Image (cartoon, helix red, strand yellow):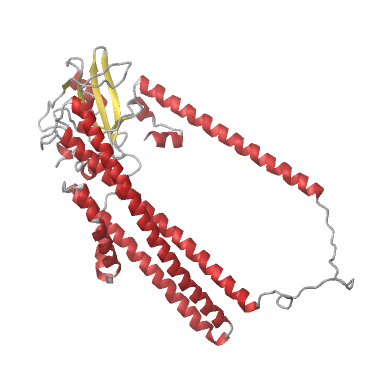
Amino acid sequence: MLQQILRDMYIDPELLAELNEEQKQILFYKMREEQLRRWKEREEKARMEEAVLRRTARRKQSDGKHVQWLCGKDGEVWVWVMGEAPGDKPYDQISEELIAERARQQAQKEAEELWRQKEAEITKKFRDAMAQEKARIAAEKWKIEIEDRKAAKLEEEKIQEELKKREEEERQKGEEQIRQQEEIRAKELYLSLKQAQQHSQHSDDDQEWEEQLRRSKAADEERSHKARRARDEYRRQSLRAIQKGIVAGLSNLFQGTSLNNEQETKLNCNSASPLLSLSAASSNIWERPSRPFSREVIIRWFKEEQVPRRAGFERNTNRIAQWFHGIISRQEAEELLMNKSEGTFLVRVSEKIWGYALSYRQQSGFKHFLVDASGDFYSFLGVDPNRHATLTDLIDFHKEEIITSSGGELLLEPCGQQKNPPDYSPLFE
């Protein structure tokens, strides 16, 4: 959310009203830094363009056009005919080398594109695995006392090191596969270009060459289409597993890597009918808008993205946390906290951002902190740099650690429901 504000250099007035004074100061400071950075970048670009124009002008002034012929021993103009001079390569050899070079460059370009796709898939897979492992460690190690946190951190670093090592192995394996495909593709293109050259020498075979080229392009597009649909099916199955609360162990995830590769190969060879059903299933995948614009969209977002992450639930139980509330306004939150003691708090679903608002009762009034949940973590917007795997982790952390150094806010007492049915009931229907 902060990156989007800095990119657009604009913040919605309603969203600005949700921030406290300290959050506003931090946000304006960040926006001013971004303005200075853009100004310096624009000035540097203008300076470089001016220098280029000056060099070009000087070069034009100093250039003088003249022609001088090279003469031979006999005093006549020296003439060279390609292929006839000593040491010249035959035309056929030059043509062969040009075709081989074109085939190599085309294969290299295709291999680079394949590697970019492969690298993106590898990065996403290992990033998701690392996030799942962090969440699992946090859930298992929460009951350990404070003095054991250092050991838990060392264990987490060890697992991260192992993940990085396996990621590097996966990258090397992917690079080797791409290299082999590049060599094979270079040979195929060489033969294809060679055949095209032979056909171009016989005008009667032009139509056959065009038909063969069309079939080759159609086959390449069909392979790419099948691979893309196979990846969509993999994502859909992953989302379904997360919604059901099924998270595999990290070791099983890496052991299943080869199985996923075999599954992708099988999907590439499937007939048209399964691909049609796959396309119909992938069309129902939830796509989050840039910002919430209605209560229905917010409820859909909560059910699709937050319920699988156990947002609003107590730790290790299926009960809704006492501090959790639904889509209520700032004024309703302050009415609930009106007669409460200092340190009482509640968390409500925000209507301004993809996340939540934490309403806090202090001695002289109320404070409201925005909680960003647009990524794969939870953190306060513009206040606390710490990132937490779950919403419950964030709340429990600030029961012991203050939110801001100036305010010294500690979450002491949750504010429960006063309505029946609860205000969060639409989120879990």
User: Residue 122 at what x, y percent from top left?
Assistant: 34, 52
Specify whether residue 127 is in view.
no
User: Residue 314 at what x, y percent from top left?
Assistant: 14, 33
| 98 left or right, relative to 425 | right
Q: What residue lies at 49% left-to-right and 76% top-to-bottom?
A: 191
Q: What residue lies at 16% left-to-right and 23% top-to-bottom?
A: 415
In depth, the one of 143 and 337 nearer the eye is 143
Q: What residue lies at 48% left-to-right and 72% top-to-bottom?
A: 189
Which residue is the extreme one toward the bottom?
A: 204
In depth, the one of 77 and 52 nearer the eye is 77
| 57 left or right, relative to 310 | right
User: Residue 401 at what x, y percent from top left?
Assistant: 25, 22
Q: Quadrant of residue 58?
A: top right
| 336 left or right, relative to 353 | left
Q: What residue lies at 22% left-to-right and 39% top-to-bottom?
A: 135
In depth, the one of 2 and 241 nearer the eye is 241
Quadrant including the N terminus: top left
Which residue is the extreme one toward the front?
A: 87
Q: Quadrant of residue 177?
A: bottom left
User: Residue 17 at what x, y percent from top left?
Assistant: 35, 25
In depth, the one of 261 and 70 nearer the eye is 70
| 37 left or right, relative to 411 | right
| Depicted 395 relative to depicted 104: above or below | above
